[in-house]
Image: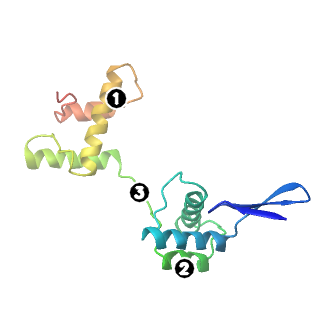
Amino acid sequence: MTQSSTKYDRTTFVLNNEVKETYLSWDDMFQQLIEFRNVHSHTRVPHRSGPLSRWVKHQRSSFRRLLVKGKQSWLTMEKLGKLETIGLIFKIRPPSVSWETRFQELVEFKKAHGHMNVPRNSGQLAGRVNSQRHAYRLLQKGKSYALKKDRLEKLEGIGFLFNTY
């Protein structure tokens, strides 16, 4: 029997002139993550960098399934504890803020500053303002789905400038 290994993925071997594959166990992949951390001083495996990144992504989705959504998952508390001890970060996306909430923030910004030219480096409100301007440009190109009529009217009602150039 001849054996070769593909790092972070599976072991392939030839038995009776047939190529066989066996995938690494959870513990083997965990060990690969520890090795990655030892080399790079973190556990942020780059996306699309092969089997280890897919495995880490799967651990995070299993975590969300288990603890955030309350559904069954094969990720046990023991495995979760192991991952946490080596510093794997399970990002939980904050719930998205409603359009109406951001609109109210824009109204408050205008009251405080006398304009609605939100600086690009001022966080999520700046991102929302930029996306509304982009949606307006798409609407001008005939993409009617880009900006809902009621939102357009609300923004126009407070004097929002869609074209700043």
Vertical order, 146 against 115 (above or below): above
Q: Earlier in the sequence, mark 1 or mark 3?
A: 3
Q: Amino acid at mark 2?
A: Gly
- Residue 88, can we see it? no
Q: Which residue is mark 2?
A: 81
Residue 101 horizontal side relative to residue 75, left or right? left
Marks 3 and 2, Cα distance to the nearest angstrom? 25 Å
Q: Position of residue 13 (x, y in %)?
A: 80, 61
Q: Position of residue 65 (x, y in %)?
A: 58, 63
Q: Amino acid at mark 3?
A: Pro
Secondary structure beneath dot 1 equals helix
Question: Looking at the rendering, in which quadrant would you find the N terminus?
Answer: bottom right
Marks 1 and 3, Cα distance to the nearest angstrom? 25 Å
Residue beneath the point at 50% across and 76% down: 84
Residue 82's image quarter?
A: bottom right
Residue beneath the point at 38% across and 30% down: 146
Vertical order, 126 against 44 (above or below): above
Choose between 150 and 10: the one closer to the eye. 10
Query: Comparing marks 3 and 2, which lies closer to the viewer?
Result: 2
Q: Position of residue 71 (x, y in %)?
A: 62, 65
